[in-house]
Image: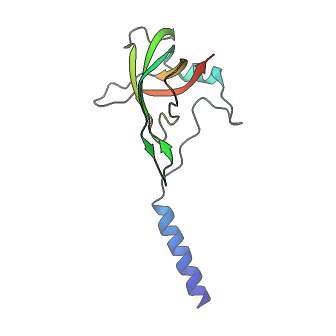
Amino acid sequence: MMKRLALAALLAFLACSAFATKPCPPPPCWTPKAQFDPAVCDAKADWIAIGHITKLVHHPAGYPLNKDFTEFTFVADRWIKGGEKLSREIPFHTQWCTNGEPMQTDTGTFRFWGKNRPDVPNAEWEYLHFEKVK
């Protein structure tokens, strides 16, 4: 009887884990020691800009997700790398893994490291990292 219970528990565990989502990869600009590395981010970014945030909308998802899926527009005031031919206003959506860091506030100035939007229909903009400029 005990073997049957153990086998049933194991099968239930395997069935549940087969439907679990894969974990997100580590943030693209972080070292293995879980620290932000600006040199790594600079190398991976297609563009870097300083600007501000407009149109911030929070979409908090409660349990079991416990994540704020924000949407906002980054307005580039100054390009540091690339971007001269891009739109000054770039809309972003926080997703589960891509653009995983939600925007908390629209107050202040921010530095963004971003990727060019792929040339396919309905492609989303991607940022690698952002930080508030002091």
Quick one: which residue is furthest to the bottom in this view? 1
* 81 vs 107: above or below: above
Q: Position of residue 41 (x, y in %)?
A: 59, 23
Quarter of the image with the C terminus is: top right
* 26 vs 41: above or below: below
Answer left or right for 84 relative to 50.
Answer: left
Quarter of the image with the N terminus is: bottom right
Near-viewer residue (66 or 33) = 66
* 100 vs 118: above or below: below
Kindly identify the residue that appears in the image at 48 percent across and 17 percent down: 52
Answer left or right for 32 relative to 82.
Answer: right
* 77 vs 36: above or below: above
Kindly identify the residue that appears in the image at 69 percent across and 32 percent down: 35
Quick one: which residue is furthest to the front in this view? 107
Answer left or right for 30 relative to 99.
Answer: right
Q: Position of residue 30 (x, y in %)?
A: 63, 31
Q: Position of residue 97 (x, y in %)?
A: 49, 40
Kindly identify the residue that appears in the image at 64 percent across and 20 percent down: 39
Quick one: which residue is furthest to the right in this view? 33
Kindly identify the residue that appears in the image at 38 percent across and 9 percent down: 85
